[in-house]
Image (cartoon, rainbow, N blue to C red):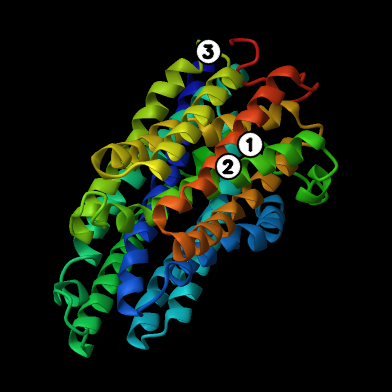
Amino acid sequence: MEAKSNNTLRHAFIAVTTLFFAWGFITAMIDPLIPSVRAIFSLSYTQSMLTQFAFFMSYGIVSLPGAALVARAGYGRSILIALVGMIVGCLFMPVATYLQRYELVLLALFVIGSGITVLQLAANPLAAVLGAPERSHYRLTLSQSFNSLGTVISPYLGSMLLLRGGVFASNGAAVDEASRAASLHNIDTGFLSIAAMLVLLLVFIWRSSARLNSSAPPPAPAHDSVLHALQSRWALLGAAAIFLYVGAEVSIGSTLINFLHQPDMLNVSLDRAGQITAVYWLGAMIGRFVGSVLLTRIRATLLLTMAAAIAAILCLCVNQGAGLAAAVCALAVGLCNSIMFPTIFTLTLERSSASAAGTSGLLCMAIIGGAILPQLAGRVADAAGLHAAYLVPMAAYIAISVFALSAAKARVVAGGQPAGSVAH
């Protein structure tokens, strides 16, 4: 009977992990989309960063109703509803490009981001609880590793599709309607392909829903909302750390293609720079696989402190350097990012006096940092250049290291997720 239960948990965990891959793939597709829309619509860095603003703003707006949806509909049905919403957003993208309206592109990204918000609200706590409590750090980091696999593949394929031909074949000449239409068509192809992937995933999750529902904990009651987590000091501190981490990671990923393209950096074409950007996400993927092992041997607070401090130093090196050395430092930040989200998430669950459901909802809402910090980085880039923009994530990583040091001194509350506190 126990073997059957473990087998059910394993299948449910696999189903949840496929969701991590999917939203990683979609999220990283925005990286090559940024230089694409910047060229098509003649945008500044700040304006092109509105793609990330529209996508990640959904976390701030949809987290509360999304938490209510999960509470009412349960984990399985909420995931299916979220996937349908994401498919609708992808199918709306060709409408936006046909009308050649940048604001409609942003609307499509907001709809897709809203679906991913609900997925995060359901999948993150599921990955943490589908197994032994003392291995929650391990499971969530392992799931995030497959999220990173999606972020590695996506910018590589996306750059080959979105940053070739059309406006990028003009060689400095004025962009005409035909080349603009060709680049817009490439965007259509990319998002229609994502829609097809999501349809296949929807079918897979639907067929796995019985196992998922039998393995999932009971949905949180409707009153157990994000608002209750606002009364917990550690829930708020964890939310601030997630806000800064996501903002820093997205700020770097969003500017990296244009940054590597610059003459004082690697001086390569945009599509080649986009393919190299995959190394940034590859570092995060490798780091998460390695980190999932390290977290069984090293205290999570110590590992997080070291990762954030090294990331801050690398950003400073990028700010002061140029050429290959600065490019390597920028790409290496991805390795440091690897364990940050799942570790901050589980450390916060351990210390929060609010429920796991309410705390995870607040943490997912804090992903809105991916909307705010890239806007700040874009403004700095427009005013002082892309090298100066790295001061924004540097400051964020310093603050995260302070959070980790503080978490090391705080006690785990009764009823909190034990995660790695005993094993470490």
Residue type of the residue flagged with mark 2: Ala
Residue displayed at 23% across by 60% down: 270
Q: Secondary structure at mark 2?
A: helix
The answer to whether residue 301 of the structure is visible from this angle is: yes
Counting from the top left corner in percent of width and height, residue 15 is at 44, 40
Which disc, if any, is residue 395? Answer: 2
Seen in the picture, residue 263 relative to 34 is either above or below; the reply is above
1 or 3: tag closer to the N-terminus: 3
Residue displayed at 28% across by 63% down: 193
Q: Are marks 2 and 1 in contact (CB under 8 Å)?
A: yes
- The quadrant of the image that shows the C terminus is top right
The answer to whether residue 214 of the structure is visible from this angle is: no
Give how far apart the Cα atoms at labels 3 and 2 are. 25 Å
Crowd tier of the residue under label 2, counting other residues whose Cα lies within 10 Å: few below 14, some 14–19, many 20 or above: some
Which residue is disc 3 drawn over? 298
Taking 366 as reference, is 145 left or right?
left
Which disc, if any, is residue 399? Answer: 1
Which is closer to the viewer, label 1 or label 3? 1
